[in-house]
């Protein structure tokens, strides 16, 4: 399920407010969320008001509970693992065009830090500020303000600048060990090149290390080998494309740079236990 399908489901439930196809805001409950991996083509902000959920963002585990907020950037792959029956929250979808129209500097610190800190603990004042932001946005849309998109754009721009300072404070206080820093760098390299490169040696060369040393450190830090991490990224992308798009299996094989559809099918089944066709048809 991709963002387009998520939007369609929210529209079917009739609980959303939107401006064109650029900005959506709606209340969300536990049964609104997909349990399949899906690749998003918008920015998603979710504020948890009650309950909790456990999921993965680009394979990394994250926990949401009351007074926490997640911000996901376009291109990430989300996967819901579990969610409590009493989960309640507010979700906002923002298109890439809308984000680009905010006029934030290209190297704006918030964008980079969002990828490393997608789930934030909101203090009392911050939670109240976010709820106020949502309330103001809803009123602008409900009142059919003639310049509603411009008003929402300015409100959102102020939000990002305010959160940018918050992320900066987080980054100053975050100290990684040498092994954790290597794991972080390895993960970033894999995210950049997993569609083309699936050999540990490639990433070891980029990090100026031997493949054996890299594998040892990654295993020690994460409990999984470097090869397993690479396979996980490739498989997650394949799952998202199988569930999120109408691409043929051959097209997905090409997208992930496999030499043939047959090779892709054997690779996918070795890791998941299902053929690509079986996974696509699975509910």
Image (tube, helix red, strand yellow):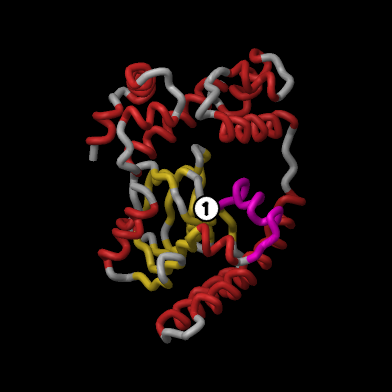
Residue 239 percent location from the top left of the image? 37, 35
Quick check: can you spot residue 90?
no
- Seen in the picture, residue 194 relative to 240 is either above or below; the reply is above
The answer to whether 112 appears left or right of 237 in the picture is right
Residue 167 percent location from the top left of the image? 68, 57
Q: Quadrant of residue 272?
A: top left
The residue lying toward the viewer, choosing from 129 and 242, is: 242
Residue, far right? 172
Q: Quadrant of the C terminus?
A: top left
- Seen in the picture, residue 137 relative to 104 is either above or below; the reply is below
Task: Please report the residue visible at 57 percent of the width from the left and 51 percent of the height from the top.
Answer: 118
Helix, strand or loop at disc 1? strand
Instruction: Give the residues in magenta.
Output: 103-118
Residue 188 percent location from the top left of the image? 62, 35
The residue lying toward the viewer, choosing from 106 and 169, is: 106
Q: In which quarter of the image is residue 81?
A: top left
Task: Please report the residue visible at 30 percent of the width from the left and 56 percent of the height from the top.
Answer: 31
- Seen in the picture, residue 13 relative to 81 is either above or below; the reply is below
Quick check: can you spot residue 263?
yes
Q: Is residue 60 magenta?
A: no
Task: Please report the residue visible at 58 percent of the width from the left and 65 percent of the height from the top.
Answer: 101
Q: Does the magenta stretch include residue 117?
A: yes
Q: In which quarter of the image is residue 127?
A: bottom right
Task: Please report the residue visible at 58 percent of the width from the left and 75 percent of the height from the top.
Answer: 155
The answer to whether 13 appears left or right of 103 in the picture is left
- Seen in the picture, residue 57 relative to 203 is either above or below; the reply is below
Residue 180 percent location from the top left of the image? 68, 33
In the picture of the structure, the residue carrying the numbered disc 1 is 72
Count residues near mark 1 (Cα–Cα under 10 Å), then give few for <14, some for 14-19, many for 20+.
many
């Amino acid at each position: 399920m991709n963002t387009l399908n998520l939007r369609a489901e929210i529209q079917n439930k009739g609980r959303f407010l939107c401006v064109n196809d650029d900005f959506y805001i709606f209340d969300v409950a536990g049964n609104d969320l997909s349990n399949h991996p899906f690749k998003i083509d918008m920015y998603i902000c979710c504020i948890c008001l009650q309950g909790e959920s456990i999921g993965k963002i680009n394979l990394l585990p994250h926990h949401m509970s009351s007074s926490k907020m997640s911000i996901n950037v376009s291109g990430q792959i989300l996967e819901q693992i579990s969610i409590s029956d009493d989960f309640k929250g507010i979700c906002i979808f923002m298109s890439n065009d809308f984000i680009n129209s905010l006029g934030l500097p290209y190297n704006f610190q918030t964008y980079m830090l969002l990828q490393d800190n997608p789930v934030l603990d909101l203090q009392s004042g911050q939670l109240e500020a976010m709820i106020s932001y949502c309330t103001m946005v809803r009123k602008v849309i409900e009142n059919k303000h003639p310049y509603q998109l411009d008003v929402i754009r300015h409100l959102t721009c102020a939000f990002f600048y305010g959160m940018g300072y918050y992320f900066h404070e987080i980054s100053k206080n975050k100290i990684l060990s040498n092994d954790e820093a290597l794991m972080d760098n390895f993960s970033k390299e894999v995210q950049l090149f997993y569609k083309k490169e699936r050999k540990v040696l490639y990433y070891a060369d980029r990090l100026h290390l031997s493949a054996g040393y890299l594998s040892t450190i990654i295993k020690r830090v994460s409990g999984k080998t470097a090869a397993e991490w690479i396979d996980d990224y490739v498989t997650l992308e394949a799952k998202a494309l199988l569930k999120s798009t109408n691409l043929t299996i051959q097209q997905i094989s090409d997208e992930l740079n496999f030499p043939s559809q047959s090779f892709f099918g054997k690779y996918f089944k070795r890791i998941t236990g299902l053929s690509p066709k079986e996974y696509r048809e699975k509910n």
